[in-house]
Amino acid sequence: MTVKFNSEFNFVTYFNESAAFLSQHSWIFEQSNTKFVQNGILDRIPAEWIADFQSASNHEFNKIPLGYLNENWSNSFRQFLNSCFDLYVNYELLIGSKETQGTVKGVGPKKMHEISNLTALIKDVCSQDEILLDFGSGLGYLSQNLNQKHDFKVLGIEGDEYRVQTSIQRQQQLFPNSTNKVKFVQHFIETDSFECIQQTAVAKLGNSIDQNYAIIGLHACADLSITAIKMFLAHKPVTKLVIMPCCYHKLKPENEECTSFSNIPLSDQFRDALAQVPNFLGRPFLRLGCQQTSARWANLTEHEHATHGKAMFARSLVEAILNQGETVTMNKTNRNSRDVLERFTVQRERQDWSWSDEHRGKLKIWMEKYPQGSELAEYLTCLQTCLQSLCENLILLDRMCFLKAESSKRDLTILADLIKLSNDHLSPRCFVIVAEKITNQ
């Protein structure tokens, strides 16, 4: 049983039920995956769940985050999975673009898939008489593709000056005929940036001051997609929004502990739901929201699971044996060594040090405590994968709820949707926020 996201979606009910469930099971994700050993997270996996995992075939193991359960598993595990599955959300799927994707120098299949599909969606939503504002334009791939395929005028806005210059050089080499219709500028976008952006568009693209705009973006990192939403709501000339959020874990924190953030919760409804349960917001929650999806998990072989479990357990082991002021990095030359410590380099005051007998003694104690640590680490990953979509749902639906509520407060009539690209195996961050202001003619 899953919930369908549509115009009748009940945000309050979903937020309340999801917040209660995630708060109850926050031990699964509340610690960084480098610190689950020292914080005793493996001890919190119920013994009957471990037995159920051990009894599962690799095929069953892969299908668990997709909604599979075995009737022979323990009641508590089946109850956990059923509660989890009931909170899964079905979104409108964007059917893959029929446009020829081709190949572009420096652009891999994943990025090309995203560019092609987002280009097709933008073409369907936006019109030729609107200037497209490409937020976080990076190296200009999306901007250039929109112009090349559909002759859009685009202003690419990027905070990194090096990327802006690279975009311009790339344009001159590969798309010299686009220089009148595609411009790139350096600007760190804030919620009050629109007047500056508007003036820049007039100066660079020669459009009139009363021009309409559409904000677009491929992988609008951290707070940028929220800035885009707020700008869309606040300024009449911005009539469309088509943006793909990512990097939720980089959201701006409001305290050193990273348990409070400027842009989550955004909506009063999600804020009220969180107020009823112990706080589970933190970097690990946000990071889980942008980890691999169940679609990727579903195709892993038994060997790949074993390899991942060993690597994850080893990394958390070495973190557990560090002394005050020590850090650890991967030793690339010995990453496959049988000796766990040879795979890593310990550092103190940014200088490489040698592993001591004290370190090795601590390691022995931990390894004796968790002889099946690698398997337990992969079981923990499976549980996290089950919760991944719930975390991402809350992050994104909070934004959709805010968008809907704020438009109502501002007496704006909008159409808004949260659309999913069809291939989340290739592109795990696959959601697009789409909004359009409706005006009475």
Image (spheres, helix red, strand yellow):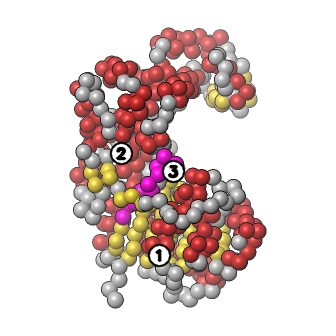
Q: Earlier in the sequence, mark 3 or mark 1?
A: 1
Q: Which residues are magenta?
A: 417-426
Q: Earlier in the sequence, mark 2 or mark 1?
A: 1
| Closest to the observer, 432 or 230 | 432
Q: Quadrant of residue 159?
A: bottom right
Count of residue discs: 3
As drawn, 292 above or below 131: above
Answer whether residue 422 is magenta in the image: yes
| Closest to the observer, 436 or 141 | 141
Q: Is residue 85 left or right of residue 97?
A: left
Circle 3 sits on which residue? 427
Residue 358 can be seen in this image = yes
Q: Nearer the viewer, mark 2 or mark 3?
A: 3
Circle 2 sits on which residue? 390
Residue at position x 64%, y 17% in the image: 338
- The amino acid sitting under disc 3 is Ser
Where in the figure is residue 172, as x and y percent of width and height?
75, 71
Q: CA distance from mark 2 to mark 3?
A: 18 Å
Q: Residues within 10 Å of mark 2 (few under 14, many from 20)?
A: many
Circle 1 sits on which residue? 126
Q: Residues within 10 Å of mark 3 (few under 14, many from 20)?
A: some
As drawn, 305 above or below 267: above
Where in the figure is residue 145, as x and y percent of width and height?
60, 68
Which structural element holds mark 3? loop
Q: Is residue 17 left or right of residue 231?
A: left
Where in the figure is residue 421, as x and y percent of width and height?
45, 56
Q: Residues within 10 Å of mark 1 (few under 14, many from 20)?
A: many
Residue at position x 73%, y 63% in the image: 166
